[in-house]
Image (tube, grey):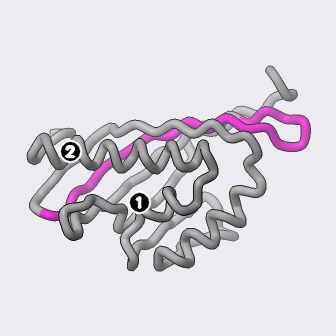
């Protein structure tokens, strides 16, 4: 079943994902960092040069540096499933990104496999693992 557990928790997790996407589009490191648990881990297996980063501070520092390569990014995300059990949840979410790089318009789509935790009544990402699904690169504006 793709959506299980209390509706209120599933809505809060969806809002966590939407807050994350909004912060990426606005390049807001503080808001983006606030979506992660202190001991979180972020895995990017399709980017072996980045690998897995552990701990909120390290994740945010890596993201701030990486975002320099994504000027004017438009980032969207939506859930494919959210399964809540107590104070933990697993979510599969999809992403769509558009940005320009060196005269090329990049359109990337991917999937995250997430674990979320509820700490002091607030849902946060405990782990995120991203894989590419589709990439399209074309002359700027096309």
Q: Indicate the secondary structure of the residue bearing disc 2.
A: helix
What is the x, y in percent for residue 112?
A: 44, 51
Q: Position of residue 75 (x, y in %)?
A: 57, 39
Disc 2 to disc 1: CB gap under 8 Å: no
Split into 4 quadrants, where in the image is the C terminus?
Answer: top right
Identity of the residue drawn at 39% across and 77% down: 38
The residue stretch that appears in magenta: 87-106
In-image side of 106 versus 42 (left or right)? right
Which quadrant of the figure has residue 122? bottom left
Residue located farthest toward the top when viewing the structure as drawn: 142
Mark 1 crowd level (few <14, some 14–19, many ≥20, 10 Å Cα)? many
According to the picture, the residue beneath numbered tag 2 turns out to be: 10
Helix, strand or loop at disc 1?
loop
The total number of labels drawn is 2
Residue at 53% over, 62% down? 30
CA gap, disc 2 to disc 1? 15 Å
Left or right, 40 with respect to 100, comes to left
**Of the residues tagged 2 and 1, which is closer to the observer?**
1
Rendered view: 74 above or below 58 = above
What residue is rendered at 63% in x and 51% in y? 27
14, 113: nearer the viewer: 14
Closer to the camera in the image, 81 or 134 = 81
The numbered dot on residue 35 is 1
Q: Is residue 31 left or right of residue 13?
A: right
Q: Residues within 10 Å of mark 2 (few under 14, many from 20)?
A: many
Image quadrant holding the N terminus, namely top left
The x and y percentages for residue 120 are 20, 69
């Amino acid at each position: 079943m793709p959506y299980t557990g209390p509706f209120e928790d599933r809505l809060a997790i969806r809002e966590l994902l939407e807050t994350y996407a909004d912060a990426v589009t606005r390049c807001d490191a503080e808001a983006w960092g606030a979506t992660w648990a202190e001991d979180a881990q972020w895995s990017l297996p399709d980017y072996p040069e980045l690998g897995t980063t552990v701990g909120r501070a390290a994740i945010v520092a890596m993201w701030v540096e990486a975002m320099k390569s994504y000027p004017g990014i438009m980032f969207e995300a939506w859930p494919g499933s959210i399964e809540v059990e107590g104070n933990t949840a697993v979510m599969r979410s999809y992403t769509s990104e558009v940005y320009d790089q060196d005269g090329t318009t990049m359109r990337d789509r991917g999937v995250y496999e997430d674990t979320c935790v509820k700490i002091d009544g607030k849902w946060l990402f405990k782990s995120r693992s991203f894989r590419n699904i589709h990439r399209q690169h074309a002359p700027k504006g096309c």
